[in-house]
């Protein structure tokens, strides 16, 4: 996995100073291997744990995830999609 230590992730250049500390603290609060790109076959104890893992990765990469589909029956499942602000807002 990664050689990142818990306090090694740094906000990208251009990140406003008033956001930098909070962002770095948030990203570094996650396990360092969660900052690596997700791979097929990862197993989680719950959908909430999976969502936290995806949030950790997306936060470190500058985008966000949303739940785009969720089912409870007959099989519990959730589909996550990514969103990125970009140059124009989408709302």
Image (tube, helix red, strand yellow):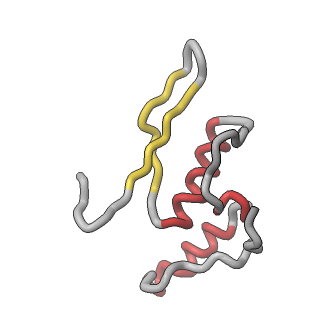
Residue sitting at 64 percent across and 51 percent down? Answer: 53
Q: Is residue 81 left or right of residue 50?
A: left
Residue sitting at 42 percent across and 85 percent down? Answer: 14
Residue 28: percent from left, percent from top: 67, 70
Residue 49: percent from left, percent from top: 67, 43
Answer with the quarter of the image where residue 6 lies: bottom right
Answer with the quarter of the image where residue 16 lies: bottom left
Q: Is residue 62 left or right of residue 72?
A: left
Q: Nearer the viewer, residue 54 or 24?
A: 54
91 in relation to 31, above or below: above
Q: Is residue 88 left or right of residue 5?
A: left
- Locate the N terminus by quadrant: bottom right
Residue sitting at 51 percent across and 65 percent down? Answer: 61
Residue 22: percent from left, percent from top: 56, 75
Residue 81: percent from left, percent from top: 44, 44
Residue sitting at 56 percent across and 66 percent down? Answer: 60
**How many labels, in total?**
0
Residue located farthest toward the top when viewing the structure as drawn = 74
43 in relation to 12, above or below: above
Residue located farthest toward the front when viewing the structure as drawn = 40
């Amino acid at each position: 996995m990664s050689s990142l230590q818990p306090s090694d992730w740094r906000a990208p250049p251009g990140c406003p100073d008033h956001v930098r500390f909070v962002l770095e603290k948030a990203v570094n609060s996650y396990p360092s291997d969660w900052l690596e790109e997700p791979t097929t076959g990862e197993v989680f104890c719950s959908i909430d744990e999976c969502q936290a893992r995806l949030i950790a990765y997306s936060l470190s990469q500058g985008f966000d995830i949303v739940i785009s589909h969720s089912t409870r029956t007959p099989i519990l499942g959730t589909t996550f999609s990514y969103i990125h602000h970009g140059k124009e807002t989408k709302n």
